[in-house]
Image (spheres, grey):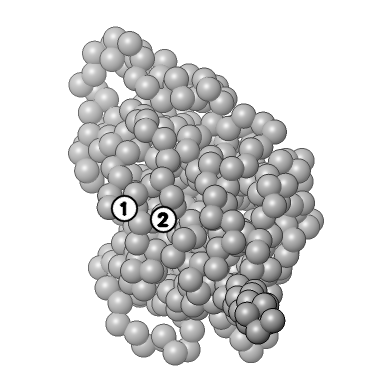
Amino acid sequence: MFKSILICVLTALLSLAMVAVPTQAVPDRPDIIVILTDDMRADDWQVLTETERLVGGMWYPNFIYTTPLCCPTRATIQRGQYAHNTGIRTNQDGHLFSDLDDDTIATALNAAGYRTVYIGKFMNDYRSRAPGWDVWETRLGNPEVDDAGEDKDDGGEGKYWVGDDYSTDVIRNRAVGAITQSPTDQPIFLFVGVHAPHTPAVPAPRHQDADVAATPTRKDLDGQRKRTLLAVDEAVVAIAEAMGPRWEEACVFVLSDNGYLVGEHETTGKSDWWDGATRVPLRSRCPGLGSGTDTRLVGTIDVAPTILRAAGATMQHELDGRALQDAWDREGILVESWDEKNAGRIRLAFSAIKGKGWLNVEAEGTTPQLYRDPAELVDSYPTLTEPERAMYAEWLAALEACAAEACRAAEQRPE
């Protein structure tokens, strides 16, 4: 009798312990966390020291933004498609995403049993509640948007403050709350969109005088931008602590929605073909990715396939990108952009092929250009033979028209 009672007591205690400890209950479906910044540069990563330490995993230095602008990138991440296939081409197109939002990483993971949580900025001029998200808190510190879909320049008030509270801190607290309120026996898909370091950049008061290594060409602008990211670094720490033991087993992705030029090529902003706008490294940790540095040419089209692979989920449509867990390589990736007012001027519509250390671009109304130097200053196109010029034109045309499997073929140099 005593032995039976003891067994019952021990069983009950074990059950309580299993409930109390937030361990990963479904090991073949890891928790998935995406941290998305806004207009972050490659050299901004030096500010995110705790983020780098806590995420670890794999560093992707050749991560390319296939349309270097907010809304198109956010749609691409949700759908795994180039912008010419999502139809979200400029920041004025955010409202059109409602035609696509019934088949995204959120709907796929929700159908696969994930608790899906979106906290923070989603995309400009998207006014609905996107399907597939169990928790949808996107109007926290979002800027007002004018009739053209442009963020109103309010001195950073709408982006960085929610009443008297710093918006990154509000987003952090909501994310932590969503984690602690989620069932411990259900995997979570948490997507966090912060406004930092979007201009006009307003650091948290506690970081106003922080010493950061700003870009010399635009020290005041870039210093303020980098200081806004210090609160993001703190938010990642808080999210990791809230996840507890589950953090170590989770898939984590930290990336931006595009890069940002601060004086390179005598310009400022995004929607441009230069490296400063299109190449910002991704850091990710996930089963199947390993750790260290992966120098493959990867991009925003590959985020959704990688998340789906980790979760064992699928979408209804075919994807243009590829799962990073697989062994593959591409020789070139498409970068495309349409007329967009940014930083006070209209950017040229263009299509380009990015490779490892080279760029071929055709901008509206200009002669094609080819850069093979790291600073992208020397145009080698005039030295090309006619067959070489024809090859680049054929390659770019194939990428501009590609979808799904055809994109994977078009990302290899024509024979």
Q: Which residue is mark 1?
A: 291
User: Where the N terminus falls, by quadrant?
Assistant: bottom right
Q: Which residue is at 30% across, 68% downward?
A: 46
Look at the picture and state if 62 lies above or below 167: above
> Camera-side residue: 147 or 406?
406
Q: Residues within 10 Å of mark 1 (few under 14, many from 20)?
A: some
Q: Which residue is at 73% across, 65% downward?
A: 135
- Residue type (three-letter) at the residue carrying disc 1: Ser
User: Where the C terminus falls, by quadrant?
Assistant: top left
Look at the picture and state if 92 lies above or below 383: below
> Camera-side residue: 351 or 87?
87
Q: Which residue is at 51% across, 67% downward?
A: 246
Picture quadrant of residue 248:
bottom left
Look at the picture and state if 98 lies above or below 254: above
Is residue 202 visible in this depiction of the protein? Answer: no
Q: Secondary structure at mark 2?
A: strand
Q: Mark 2 and mark 1 in contact? Answer it, CB < 8 Å.
A: yes
Q: Which residue is at 78% across, 57% downward?
A: 129
Look at the picture and state if 131 lies above or below 204: above
Q: Which residue is mark 2?
A: 285
